[in-house]
Amino acid sequence: MNIGVPRGLLYSKYHVFAETFLEEIGAKIVVSPATNKLILDEGVRYCVDDACLPMKVFHGHVSWLKDRCDAMLVPRFIGIKEKEYICPMFCGSIEMVSNNIPQLPCLIDTPICSTQNYKLSQWAKKTGSVLTKDENKIMAALDKALQRHGNSKTGFNDEGYPLKIGLIGHAYNIYDKFINMDLKKKLNGLGIGIITSEYINGADIADEAGKLFKKPFWTFAQEYYGAAVCIIKTKKADGIIYLSSFSCGIDSVVIELIKSETGDFPFMVLKLDEHTGEAGFDTRIEAFADMLKRRCGIGHNLS
């Protein structure tokens, strides 16, 4: 059976796990290509207007796959930790694509409430039953998928640049080169390295998030706030760029929480949507880079 895997939303964080699991139970994986204009245009065509850019991009990936697979993995992500949640749109993504995109194949939409082993076992048994009834095979596939996922590493921690910035934001914004217009390449070209939240100590992130008057119940809000505050306090970078999707409710809260801690630490928010122009995007990045160079007393020409 050909199982489609859309290259959108949490793909960058969990694709090693998902693809290993499906392959181990006998599936042939069909992954949509990296985001491009055709996929974005398809997503804008099918998705509701007031959805964020990543959700529109996800619709485009689903549309690209629909005639190329027998079934498609579109898990209903509710949360990745116990008693914590992620974006509400993830919970409704199945209904969104099902009602917006015609002639979809079978959707493998088993809910994921937590990535803890017991909950994942329940997910694996139900998802794996699409291809096999052999529970031993399913559990062996789960073990291998968890092992490979544990050995994989995402994130950036550039070395050898005169300046470094903390790049904070959702993985589907940071690692999709098309929708962020290859921001990493642009920054590196200006002589600026990047560090992302994956390279900030998890215990330190949790400690900073725990100091809030009320702990956010969104897992990613805690991670991004905690990572940003750690960067500010430890000076792991010379500034922070928060990469945000226009209309993202969670980001609107996290950004304000981070601003309350920045003081005079350089902090810039870059908003993304399908109308974002590259010229204006470049101008803001270059201005931020010039400010960092002056602040740090570094020669103007770093590239």
Image (cartoon, rainbow, N blue to C red):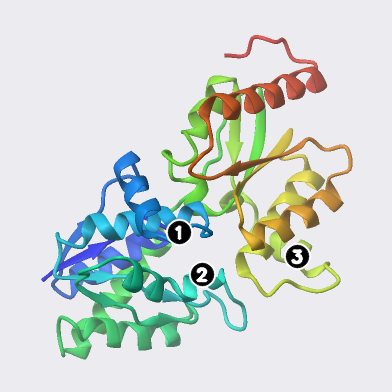
Task: Between residue 303 and residue 66, name the one nearer to us.
Answer: 66
In front here: 154 or 253? 253
Tag 1's secondary structure?
Answer: helix
Please report the residue visible at 34 percent of the width from the left and 66 percent of the height from the top.
Answer: 17
Q: Position of residue 184 (x, y in %)?
A: 51, 33
Measuring from the top left, give residue 87's x and y in whole percent: 56, 68
Q: Quadrant of residue 68?
A: bottom left
Q: Identify whether 121 is placed above or below 156.
A: below
- Residue at 18 percent across and 62 percent down: it is 29
Find the distance from the CA under tag 2 to the CA under tag 3. Answer: 23 Å
> Which residue is found at the position 56% from the left and 77% from the top?
81
**Residue 33: x, y in percent?**
26, 47
Q: Is the C terminus in the top left, top right, bottom left or bottom right quadrant? A: top right
Callout 3: few (<14), some (14-19), or many (20+) C-alpha neighbours within 10 Å? many
Q: Which residue is mark 2?
A: 89
**Are dots 1 and 2 in contact, CB under 8 Å?**
yes
- Amino acid under disc 2: Met
Which residue position holds label 1? 55
Q: Secondary structure at mark 3?
A: helix
In space, the residues marked 1 and 3 are separated at their CA atoms by: 27 Å
